[in-house]
Amino acid sequence: MCHGRGEHRKYRDKGLAALLHAEWLAPQKVRNNPFAREAVSSTLNLAQREAGGSDLRGLAWRMGMGPTG
C-alpha cells in the first residue's frame, strides 16, 4: 500500500530500473513488448507532471514513443 508521493516515486523508480536492465539484456524484446510499452506509456503520462526523467524519456524515445501533448 502506497502512503504518498515518495513511496509512489520509489516504486516507479524501481520499475524503471527493472525495465532499463531488461532493455540492456534484450533491447528488441523490451522495446517491442506490449506490456513494457504500456508500462512506459503510463509511467510517462504520470511523470509528465514531474517532467519525467531523462532515463524514462530516453527509454520511451528508443521504443518509438515520442512525446504527446
Image (tube, helix red, strand yellow):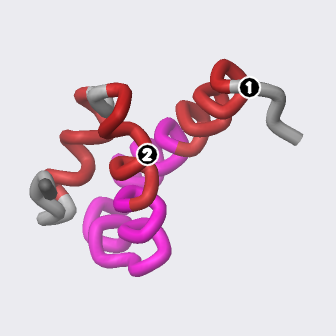
Span colored in magenta:
16-41
* Picture quadrant of residue 12: top right
The quarter of the image holding the C terminus is bottom left
Check disc 2: other Cα within 10 Å, few if <14, some if 14-19, many if 20+.
few
The quarter of the image holding the N terminus is top right
Horizontal side of 53 relative to 9 (left or right) equals left
Mark pair 1, 2: CA separation: 14 Å
Secondary structure beneath label 2: helix
- Residue at 28 percent of width and 28 percent of height: 51
- Residue at 19 percent of width and 41 percent of height: 58
**Amino acid on which the number 1 mark rests in the picture:** Gly
- Residue at 81 percent of width and 36 percent of height: 2
Q: Which mark is residue 4?
A: 1
- The residue nearer to you, when weighing 29 against 9, is 9
**Amino acid on which the number 2 mark rests in the picture:** Leu
Q: Find residue 19 and report its horizontal and vertical position in percent.
A: 46, 50
Which secondary structure type mostly characterizes the magenta part of the structure?
A: helix
- Considering every residue shown, the one lying at the far right of the view is 1
Q: Is residue 19 magenta?
A: yes
* Picture quadrant of residue 26: bottom left
Q: Find residue 39 and report its horizontal and vertical position in percent.
A: 47, 61
**Against 21, is 61 above or below?**
below
- Residue at 48 percent of width and 75 percent of height: 35
Residues at discs 1 and 2 in contact (Cβ within 8 Å): no
Secondary structure beneath label 1: loop
- The residue nearer to you, when weighing 8 against 15, is 8
Which residue position holds label 2? 46
